Image: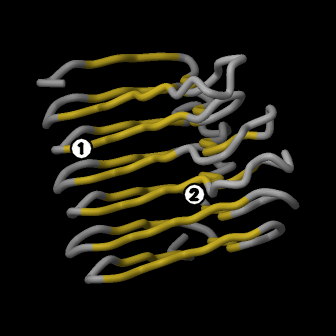
Amino acid sequence: SAGGRVDSHQLFIGNSADPADVATVTIDGSGSIVNVATTTYVGTSSPGTLIVSNGGTLNTGTDGASVFSIDQDFGSVGGSIVNIDGAGSVLNHLGASGIAVGRSTSASAATPARLSVTGGGQVNAERLDISLFGNSQGLVAVGGANSEINVADEIQVATQGMGTLIVEDGGAVTAGNK
């Protein structure tokens, strides 16, 4: 927070062998920035929570090819959360594989992976997949004035599994502006 900076090759949040463990990463405050060159996983073997708030910035997939996944299929128990909240709070995913919300084939993933954008937060990505595989569950919610998700290519909801996209209270989602 308070203008801190982290540069990393990869970011794993919730990678414990014990599914009862929950990991949390918070990027808070204007000038606070995390840059991840390749893959970001929130929730692999255990649940993870990622919060970008009060003007914080997360840039991922800067190599141009990597995925950003919430509840990745490594035995995830589900229920991982990414919350982008507040004016100036931004998640930029530059990887061509885009953002996947609910990518687990594990039958135990009973709680949906969740991406929420609120309070004027912003998400920018190449593509967005909500519930990508058979047993996965994904929920994306965008709400509040100036809260937005901008997708350059396409959004797919429930390719398999159960996916939900909610846009409310002045939130906005755009896709296909390549």
Which labelled disc corresponds to residue 126? 2
Q: Nearer the viewer, residue 100 or 17?
A: 17
Give the residue displayed 64% in from the left and 61% down from the top: 138
Colour setup of the view: secondary structure
Q: Tell me the kind of residue under disc 1.
A: Ser
Give the residue displayed 60% in from the left and 53% down from the top: 113
- The secondary element bearing badge 1 is classed as strand
Question: Residue 154 appears at what percent x and percent y?
Answer: 63, 71
Q: Quadrant of residue 174?
A: bottom left
Q: Tell me the kind of residue under disc 2.
A: Glu
| Quarter of the picture holding the N terminus | top left
- The secondary element bearing badge 2 is classed as loop
Question: Residue 111 appears at what percent x and percent y?
Answer: 64, 54
Vertical placement of residue 30 versus 45, above or below: below
Q: Quadrant of residue 65?
A: top right
Q: Nearer the viewer, residue 93 or 146?
A: 146
Numbered label tally: 2
Which residue bears the numbered disc 1? 53
Marks 1 and 2, the one that precedes in the sequence: 1
